[in-house]
């Protein structure tokens, strides 16, 4: 608890997570197709998980041809009436690996 009087919790920064995501696009367009990721904050008690807040991130908005890094703060929607506000703060980086030609 960072501030127990206002109910603010802050977790330490975990190790960096690396993922590989495939984004598709029509060759006639510059923009990629939507790739939504959902983040869910859960309360885990006695082995049971209960969603507390959730948010969405569309990865196509952060896909660039050149490598880059961006800091984000996503507002999560409270799913529990005890939660008034919830934010997820993180850094996202993207790197173009390769483009595959059409299979048709």
Image (tube, grey):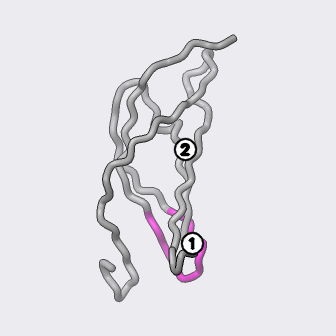
Local SS, label 1: strand
Q: Looking at the picture, does residue 28 appear above or below residue 47?
A: above
Q: Is residue 78 magenta?
A: yes
Q: Residues within 10 Å of mark 1 (few under 14, many from 20)?
A: few
**Can the viewer see residue 83?**
no
At a point 58% along the width and 39% down the height, the residue shown is 35
Local SS, label 2: strand
Q: Is residue 15 left or right of residue 102?
A: left
Pinpoint residue 71: horizontal percent, then vertical percent.
35, 48
Pinpoint residue 29: horizontal percent, then vertical percent.
60, 20
Give the residues drawn in magenta, as a range: 76-87
Decide which of 28, 53 is in the foreground and name it.
53
Q: Is residue 56 magenta?
A: no
At a point 59% along the width and 81% down the height, the residue shown is 81
Between the residue at mark 2 and the residue at mark 1, the CA separation in whole angstroms equals 25 Å
Q: Looking at the picture, does residue 11 appear above or below residue 66?
A: below
Closer to the chain start, of discs 2 and 1, is: 1
Q: Residues within 10 Å of mark 2 (few under 14, many from 20)?
A: few
At a point 30% along the width and 78% down the height, the residue shown is 2
Report which residue position mark 1 lands on.
Answer: 49
Q: Which mark is residue 58?
A: 2
**Quarter where residue 67 is shown:** top left
Q: Is residue 18 left or right of residue 78?
A: left
At a point 52% along the width and 63% down the height, the residue shown is 76
Nearest to viewer (mark 2 / mark 1): 1
Pinpoint residue 64: horizontal percent, then vertical percent.
43, 29
Task: Single out the residue that lies furthest toward the bottom.
Answer: 5
């Amino acid at each position: 608890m960072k501030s127990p009087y206002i109910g603010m919790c802050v977790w330490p920064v975990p190790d960096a997570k690396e993922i590989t995501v495939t984004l598709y696009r029509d060759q006639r367009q510059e923009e990629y197709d939507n790739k939504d990721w959902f983040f869910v904050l859960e309360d885990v008690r006695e082995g049971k998980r209960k969603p507390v807040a959730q948010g969405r991130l569309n990865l196509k908005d952060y896909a660039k041809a050149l490598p880059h890094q961006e800091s984000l703060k996503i507002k999560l929607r409270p799913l529990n009436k005890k939660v008034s506000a919830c934010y997820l703060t993180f850094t996202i980086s993207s790197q173009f690996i390769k483009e595959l030609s059409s299979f048709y």
